[in-house]
Amino acid sequence: MSQDVALVIQSLFAKLQKLPVDSVDMTADLFEAYGLDSLRAVKLLSSLEVELDIELPSEDTAKIRTLNDVLACAQRALGAR
Amino acid sequence: MSQRVLFTTIFRPFEVPGKYNLPGDEKFLDYFSNRLTREPGFYSLHDDHPTVAPHLIAANVDADVTVLETPTIEEFKAELGKGYDVVCITFLTLHFTKLVHMIAWARKLAPDTKVVIGGFGTALFDLDRLDVDGVCQAEGIGYMRDFLGQAAAEPVIHPIITFDIKMRIGVQHPELPRKKVGVIVNGFGCPHACEFCSTSAYFGKKHVPLIRSGADLHGTMARYDAEAGVRDFVIYEEDFYLYKRHINDFIAAARGDSTLYSYACYATIKSLSLFDIEDLVDSGLSHVWIGVEAVDSPFNKSVGKPIREVFEALQRYGVTTTGSIIAGLDHHKKDNLEAEFAHLASLFPSTVQISNLIAGPGTPLRARLGSEGRLAGEPNLLDSHLYSDQVIHPEFGKGELRELIFKGYDYVYDAIGPALYRIMKTWYGGSKTLRASPRERLRARGEHLARRASALRPVFLRTAEYLPNDAIRANVAACLAEMEADIGAPSEAELAMADLFRAKFDAEKERLAKEGAHVYSAGTRVATYTDRPFRAAGVPNIAARAPQKPRRAGFDVSLARLHRST
């Protein structure tokens, strides 16, 4: 389950950043390592919400720095569903 | 084969605080008691305003169109499954994160459907980076005709768009009376180019006419009357009286018709100074929004007759007014802001707007304040509205102006009473002037105003204790007594209505004590346009000219300002 969600996140992020999926580092700082800006961050989180049909609470998403943080948020949201 | 187009607003709810809404975001659709003007107390007005542009476009494109207003996200998702060729989403700045969410759903559930975004929110950001097929940043009929491959020069018609104005407590008590009003869009943009004005900046400081002549405008009113029984209108145009030939043509057309229509509009001291108020009243002017802005307004639009003279002349003829001021102009200090509130109240406007100084994207003000280092960093987009605290003012701390603005609304209420009382008094005062006129049409308008003022009496006959203070109670009582001596005692029906108002005020007081301030929740509205009304025989073409091609302009807002958290 956790691996499936991680794969979804990696795949969405790769598409957004136009990168190969296998080059995506779940532990890297999204803003420093990948130059993610706030618009892309919103797009990533919205796409994830739609893909998994979940709602990510804003108090969680405001603290996100890595894709592992995104994964943790998504797992909490899936657990709460 | 016909193309199928869905127009939709942003999804609701607006009133539930959380990721997408701040507390009090019900203001989106409630112009009277939240978004455009405010008032404490039980007498405040309310409307559930339609989103006009989608209807205007839908009636003029060669497609089968559904217009969805304030759907839930589930309703939007269900609609996406119906196989549209194009989905158009209109949004305001504060709804940006909802927009991104809706685009994501559209891409998942309708991957072959094109997505177009529009509305004043498109002044933000480099939106081409969103996953959309079109960004409409101009007059929408022309844009969508171009997008759909339709000839731009086909006739344009004005659809019938109506809404109800009622009292705020009428939301909880729907049996209270309401008034149906028609919306007419006369044109867009404004050449005054005041430095703070987002509308002017959005349309490149130019006026973009929609209705080509005053006769066509009057004809549109007559069509509303024939098709929907509506004779009261709000005309959307930033400075209606600025276009003198158009207005003279309109006045002539109105005088050639025995039916008396009434309209509300937006105008400036500058343009109002071009006309004799009596001629404007003859054309149906019943309410006008005037940007007072400040005691010594620094804006060119305020040049003309003295503002007090204009307000008094309007009120003498029974024209109700909205006076709006901006708090946080450069010269404002803690010790001169109350003088602004006092000046506004002294003009006796029927409704008021006191807004914070907002530096919208693309405005000269934003450029100036940016160069002066006076733009607050990282504003929360959810908090983008009239009372936003986005400008740094050396005299006021963060959030201080917003607090003072709400005190300003209280000040006006305490000084001159509820808007409904001001409206009743203005209508009655105007009826006295007009009933004495040598001109038959104006006398008829005077009788009409007397009936309107009389219809408002029941609101006040039994509710004196709900008024803000003894001075206002005395003023209201004096007005009621003068009306009774002039136009007669309230009828049995009016007295019964007075009892109903009293009962509803009491019920609302009890409900508030138990449940707290009420929260308005919008419902879903659906309309369809499938018969190409702009091609129908006998329907007049109102187009001023071939609609504008879309404008491509850069955006001056940093992406770093996009802030997701609440």
Image: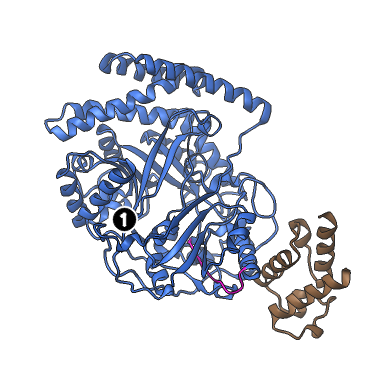
Instruction: Say which colour chain B has.
Output: blue
Residue B221 horizontal/vertical position (percent): 27, 47
**Which chain: brown?**
A
Q: Chain of mark 1?
A: B
Q: Secondary structure at mark 1?
A: loop
- Give the residue at x 61% y 67%: B106
The answer to whether any part of residue B302 appears in the image is: yes
**Residue tagged by mark 1?**
B186
Outermost residue, right direction? A2
| Quadrant the C terminus of chain B occupies | bottom right
Outermost residue, left direction? B438
Decide if residue B464 is on the left or right side of residue B483. right
Amino acid carrying mark 1 in the image: Asn
The image's colouring method is by chain
Based on the picture, tell me whether residue B47 belongs to the magenta stretch.
Answer: no
User: In the picture shown, does residue B99 fall above or below B319?
Assistant: below
- Give the residue at x 34% y 59%: B533
* Nearest the eye: A19 or B141: B141
Residue B195 horizontal/vertical position (percent): 42, 60
Decide if residue B381 is on the left or right side of residue B423. right
Q: Which residues are magenta?
A: B110-119
- Give the residue at x 69% y 83%: A18
Q: Indicate the quadrant where residue B113 lies.
A: bottom right
* Nearest the eye: B553 or B500: B500
Decide if residue B48 is on the left or right side of residue B152. right
| Quadrant the N terminus of chain B occupies | bottom left
Residue B542 horizontal/vertical position (percent): 26, 60
